[in-house]
Structure formats: C-alpha cells, structure tokens
Image (cartoon, rainbow, N blue to C red):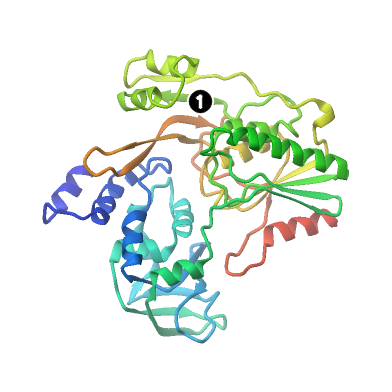
C-alpha cells in the first residue's frame, strides 16, 4: 500500500489537507479503528473561515441504505427521511467506498458510524473538494424516484445549523417513576483532578438513586467515545455482583516509540511502565491486573440494570458494556455497537516530525471477558433501533415503555 500510494503522487508538493488524506489511506489499510489519523480539522477550519462551502445534506446510514437526516439546502420541500440513491449520477454506495480509505475501522458498519460521527459533508469535502451544486437522486416516502439540484451551503453556516458533535455525552441523572436514568458522561478528563471529580459525582448519583428507592437503573453509554478503564471500573463497581475484569486477556506490544511515550508523562517507577521499558522492542507481553472489587453492599445498587448502546458507542464504553453483559450484571439494550469489544486499543499518539500530523496507534490487544475473539460489535440483549432521521429517542422511550409493561 505504501508503494502504491507513493507511486500515485504526480507532484512532490502537497498541502496539509492532501498530506493528511494520503497518510489516512495508509493507516486505514490496517482495518483497525484505533490506528488512525483524525479528520484534518485545521485545514477544514481554514477553509471554513475563508468562506468555503460544503454539501448541504447530513446523512444517516442504516441497514445498507442511506437516508437524508437533515436538509440545510435551499430546497423548500421536505426531503428529511428520504432515501438518497446517487450524487451527480454516482451511486451512494460507490461514494461511500471512495470515502472509506479516509476512515480507520474494522468493517463497513463501523466506517459508516464514523462517517456519521465526522459528518458526511466534511468527509465529502475532504475527498472531492469545493463544488457549488449537485444533482441528487432520491426515493421519497411515497416510493417515487426524484431528481433535485441542491446548492452548497457555507461551511460556517453548516456547522452552526448542525448543532454540535454526535459524540458529546453529558453527565446527568433523571428519574422516571421507579426507574433511574444515569448518563455517566465522559470516561476521561484532561484535568489532573478530573477522575476525583468523576468519582464524587458518580458516588453522589448512586446515593440519590438509593434515596429515591429506584427499582431499575438505566445507564446510557450511547454516543460515548470511551476512555480510561479506571472510570468505567468505578462506575460498574456500584452495581457489580462480584469482582470483575474488563478483559479475559490483555497484551501489549513494546516499541521504541511507545517507550518514548511512556517516559514522558508517567511515573516510570509504576510496574506497568517498568515492564514495558524493561523488555526489548517488538515483544508482546501479557498483563493481568487484580480484579476490581464492588463497593460495599450498603452503597451498591441491587435492582435491575439496563445499559443503552448504539453504533456510536466506542472503545472502553463498548468494552464496559460487554463486561456488563458477560458477567450478567445487566441487560444491554439498543443497537449493535460500531466498535468491537474484542479489539486493538489502549491507544497512544505521536507526532510526525516533518508535518506535526498526529498519528494514533493501539499498543494493546483486548479480548472481551467471555473470551470471544470474533470481529463483531456488541450485540444487545434487547434490540431497539434508533432511527436518526428524527429527534425521537426510540431506544430510551422503547425501554421505558417495556419496563412499565
């Protein structure tokens, strides 16, 4: 792939956007979600600030079909929920295939989830550049095939109308009768005291749940990027029935660049760091950490646990949900996750010396607690599809109705 990409270059001077796209083709070839170069935000922001425009339709990818989720074009008729067939005569499936090399993921289902996450208009601009209008072919809700011309929208207007990123979980606690709902929010923090704040807020939430006398608890891990196992372990300890681990096997591959990464921010006297630094480059080492203990029984929630997941449940959030399923601590509800609970993860990052482009790579291989190594997402115990074409929350509302019955 490296030779193919190098031979494809027609000139030896690339701008930052072109360089990122080229390198993304190389790292995505591994078909590993945690081996990635992010969307070139700096180039996009520069384009946005210079008055650049983008494709005006936000898309949703469901069951091998593509739907118009939001319409920011000047078209007056309602086309939200219509199925998109082609853009400028090119089938949408062919366009997806051309966009996939810009996205690192294990399989097409996960690539589509990331395409929603980064947003189709952004990735489409990255791949095809600036354009003023497109002819789209769609099938409307009555089954009629239509052709329409849509004009570009200013990128800055698109970002304002989009209403924020898909991945942005907010910590919250709500009560629906005898059912409590907890969104634990981000499982990481850039602040040095972030974990202590998280512990206090989660502990406080479970105190309120206990005082309320809730019989059921819904934990929402949808649209969650994951994070650190310390966060997820602390959360799970408040309803775990026995000691637990987030893996059945966890191994790490040493390398020169990983050792440089370990020496910078961490305490090299810590045993994990010592083992990494004490082994030669390229060696794969298995680690086994002590099982995490549940909190004392007086603080523990003993009612029924439900965990909400969707295709935007990533990394440690997906691993945590798999742990809960495998240990039978709770019932998983929603749709199959894009990320896989057996995966190459434990990600770290380094900068390329000439371009300062950040490359993220996995140092570890995690096998889910039940030992299943198959490359598939976490499959819920109760399947409820969340159609992203409307503002209705089918998963939460469907589960609350089920609990009420």
Q: Which residue is mark 1?
A: 250
Q: Residue at x 50, y 70 (%)?
A: 161
Outermost residue toward the bottom in this view = 76
Quadrant where the image shows the N terminus: top left
Q: Secondary structure at mark 1?
A: strand
Q: Quadrant of the C terminus?
A: bottom right
Of residues 95 and 46, the one drawn nearer to the viewer in this rendering:
46
Q: Residues within 10 Å of mark 1 (few under 14, many from 20)?
A: some
Question: How many marks overall?
Answer: 1
Foreground of the two, 130 or 382: 130
Task: Identify the residue at image location x=57%, y=20%.
Answer: 289
Q: Nearer the viewer, residue 230 or 22?
A: 230
Give the quarter of the image for residue 277. Answer: top left
Please, is residue 387 above or below residue 7 in the view? below
- Residue at image coords 33%, 53%: 101
Left/right of residue 200 with respect to residue 91 in the rendered view: right
Q: Is residue 15 left or right of residue 49?
A: left
**Rendering coords of residue 13 (x, y %):** 14, 53
Picture layout, residue 76 above or below residue 303: below
């Amino acid at each position: 792939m490296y030779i193919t990409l190098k031979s494809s270059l027609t000139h030896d001077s690339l701008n930052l956007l072109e360089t990122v796209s080229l390198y993304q083709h190389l790292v995505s070839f591994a078909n590993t979600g945690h081996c990635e170069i992010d969307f070139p935000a700096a180039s996009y922001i520069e384009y946005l600030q210079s008055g650049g425009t983008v494709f005006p339709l936000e898309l949703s990818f469901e069951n091998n079909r593509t739907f118009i989720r939001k319409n920011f074009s000047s078209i007056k008729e309602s086309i939200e929920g219509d199925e998109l067939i082609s853009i400028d005569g090119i089938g949408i499936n062919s366009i997806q295939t051309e966009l996939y090399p810009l996205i690192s993921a294990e399989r097409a289902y996960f690539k589509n989830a990331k395409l929603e996450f980064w947003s189709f208009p952004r990735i489409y601009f990255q791949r095809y550049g600036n354009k003023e209008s497109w002819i789209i072919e769609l099938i409307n809700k009555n089954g009629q095939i239509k052709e329409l011309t849509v004009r570009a929208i200013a990128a800055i207007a698109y970002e304002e109308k989009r209403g924020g990123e898909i991945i942005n979980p907010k910590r919250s606690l709500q009560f629906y009768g005898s059912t409590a709902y907890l969104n634990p929010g981000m499982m990481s923090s850039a602040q040095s005291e972030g974990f202590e704040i998280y512990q206090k807020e989660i502990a406080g939430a479970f105190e309120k749940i206990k005082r309320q006398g809730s019989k059921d608890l819904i934990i929402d891990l949808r649209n969650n990027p994951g994070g650190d196992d310390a966060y997820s372990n602390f959360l799970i300890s408040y309803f775990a029935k026995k000691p637990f681990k987030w893996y059945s096997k966890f191994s790490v591959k040493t390398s020169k660049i990983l050792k440089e990464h370990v020496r910078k921010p961490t305490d090299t006297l810590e045993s994990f760091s010592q083992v990494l630094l004490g082994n030669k480059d390229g060696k794969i080492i298995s680690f086994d950490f002590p099982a995490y203990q549940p909190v004392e029984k007086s603080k523990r929630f003993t009612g029924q646990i439900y965990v909400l997941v969707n295709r935007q449940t990533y990394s440690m959030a997906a691993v945590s949900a798999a742990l809960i399923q495998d240990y039978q601590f709770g019932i998983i509800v929603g749709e199959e996750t894009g990320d896989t609970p057996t995966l190459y993860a434990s990600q770290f990052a380094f900068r390329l010396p000439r371009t300062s482009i950040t490359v993220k790579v996995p140092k570890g291989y995690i096998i889910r607690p039940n030992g299943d190594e198959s490359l598939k997402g976490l499959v819920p115990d109760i399947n409820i599809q969340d159609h992203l074409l409307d503002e209705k929350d089918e998963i939460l509302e469907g589960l609350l109705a089920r609990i009420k019955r």
